[in-house]
Structures are given as structure tokens and as C-alpha cells.
Amino acid sequence: MQSKLPFILSRADEEAAILRARFQEFGYLFFRGYVPAETCDALLAELLAQTDGQVTLDADSGLPQLAGRPFVESDPDWDRIYPRIQALESFHGFFHSPPMLDLMRTVAGKEVFLYPMKMARISTPNKIGYETPPHQDAYSHHAGPTMAGIWVALHAIQAGMGRIMVLPGSHRDGVRKVFAAEGVGGVQCEIYPHETTWHVADCSRGDVLIFHSATVHKAEPNTTVSTVRVSVDTRFCDYGAPVFSTNLEPHHGWRIEGLEWDAIYRGWQARELQHYWRDYPNLF
Ligand SMILES: O=C(O)CCC(=O)C(=O)O
């Protein structure tokens, strides 16, 4: 039987040593409203604009609504929409802002390297069974122990809308065996019989979840009638830690033809985030 407890709350103004100790104990940190509402609204509007009306924003609730066919990652609708999202300079720049980097440095306790691969998640209703299965990013990203995921809710995400959940303390048992699964990432990892209590919470716009590379996490199914869950995430590690080559590619660049950096950069104004990892000292 699976039970759920609320995320333990962290505050960015807590002492860094306390945050780091909590991160090592539970394998995650959850910060309420860290990203300003206007920043989330602006990015969400840009992401939805790339769907050509398939996902729209309900002005009253502030929640994305499905206005066309449901889809999951790798469906033809996704493959049409996602290259446009990946081409957004604001989407890539979102995680490189000084406050975001500060939070990552606080958790790491040192300078960090932000992975080039940035992810947007669009979890539509009517796709139950395709939600993100339980997994560890250490496996999917071939990453070591200083790598962590950083995930941001771009709007309120309530129960039934595909919330993200973590298995607290699961990072302490190392990287686990995996099995093929439907849903984002295509694999799920082993869950031990004693691991029955997950941590989860209704999110507000701008809430940030940071999770250890070996922390097991998954998404709940989106069981709403028409509300879509949209979030963004990426990875970071201690500066100098090994980074595997697949993380240097655009997300889904391995399967969507033409989704490559030169195409992504075509409409960008600034150059400093283009190929910024080329001098990184530990790529393999
Ligand atoms: O938001 C999701 O559904 C997936 C997020 C996730 O699994 C991750 O960031 O590793």
C-alpha cells in the first residue's frame, strides 16, 4: 500500500548547512514560491503559445487547459510542438538566472555546472499510464552523486493534475535495477517492499523541487477532465564532476529530426548561453 506525506518545506534563507544536511537526509528540498509569479507566467505563456491552441490558458483559474487532442512525449503532436519550445531562448535562460544558480550553489555548497539539456513537461489528461514512472536520474543521465534535478511548477498543481512525488531517503540505497515502462523516460526502477511512503504536495506557481540524482521520483497520473500540468526541469552538478555526453544534446534531440543546437539558436539574441559547456573540463 502506498501512503503519502507532505513535502518537508525548506526556505532559501535557512542556513546553507541546514539545507545541505536535510538534502542528504531526505534526498530532496522543496521551496515554496522561489521563482517570482511573473517569471512563471511569462514562461508558461510562451510555452503554451508554441502549441498552436492545443493547450490554452484559462484566465480565471490560471491553469492550462487541453483544447485539442491529448498527447504524451514522443506522440506526433509532441514532436511538432516540442522543437518550438526548445527553440525558446527564455526557456533555456530560465535556469541560468542568478537566483536559480544561487539556489543550486547553496544546495551544492560550491560552484555548479548546469546541464545543457533543459526539459519541459506537458502532462495532459486522458493519458493515464503514460505519466513519469518511478526512476532515478542517476540512471537516466549516467550521473554521479553530486548531480541533482531541479524542477519548477509554472502554475498551481493540485492533486489529480500529475503532481511529482519523491521517495524520501531512497537516494541512500544506491542506483537500482530498472525495467521497461510506459511513460516519460521509458524505464522504471525497483522499489523495495519497505518503501511505501511518498512525499508530495499541491504546488503553487514558482515552487521548486531539488532532488538528489539517486532519489526515486515519479509523477501522479493526470486524472482531470481538461487541465494540463506544465513544469520545467534540468540538472546540475558540482562544477568539475563528470558529465555524460547525452546530456549535452537538446532534450529529444536523439529522436526528433532537426532538433539540434544550431536550429535552436537560430532566433536567439544572446550568444553567451550558446554551447556554453564547450570548455567544461570533465565531459565523457
Ligand atoms: O515532471 C515530470 O513528470 C518528470 C520530472 C522528472 O522525472 C525529472 O525531472 O526527472
Image (spheres, rainbow, N blue to C red):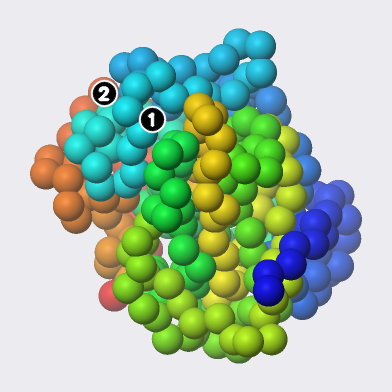
Residue 235 image position (x, y, % from top left): 49, 58
Please, what is the three-letter code of the amino acid marked with disc 2?
A: Gly
Circle 1: residue type = Glu
Residue at the image position 48 percent from the left and 70 percent from the top: 135
* Residue 90: quarter of image: top left
- Mark 1 crowdedness (10 Å alpha carbons): few <14, some 14-19, many ≥20: some
Residue at the limit of the structure toward the left, as seen here = 257
> Percent from the top left, x then y, of residue 257?
11, 44
Mark earlier in primary sequence (2, 1): 1
Element assignment for label 1? helix
Q: Is residue 136 above or below residue 82?
A: below
Quarter of the N terminus within the rendering: bottom right
* Quarter of the figure with residue 84: top left
Is residue 201 toward the left or the right of residue 212 in the image? Answer: right
Q: Which residue in the protein does label 1 denote?
A: 89
Q: Is residue 125 left or right of residue 154?
A: left
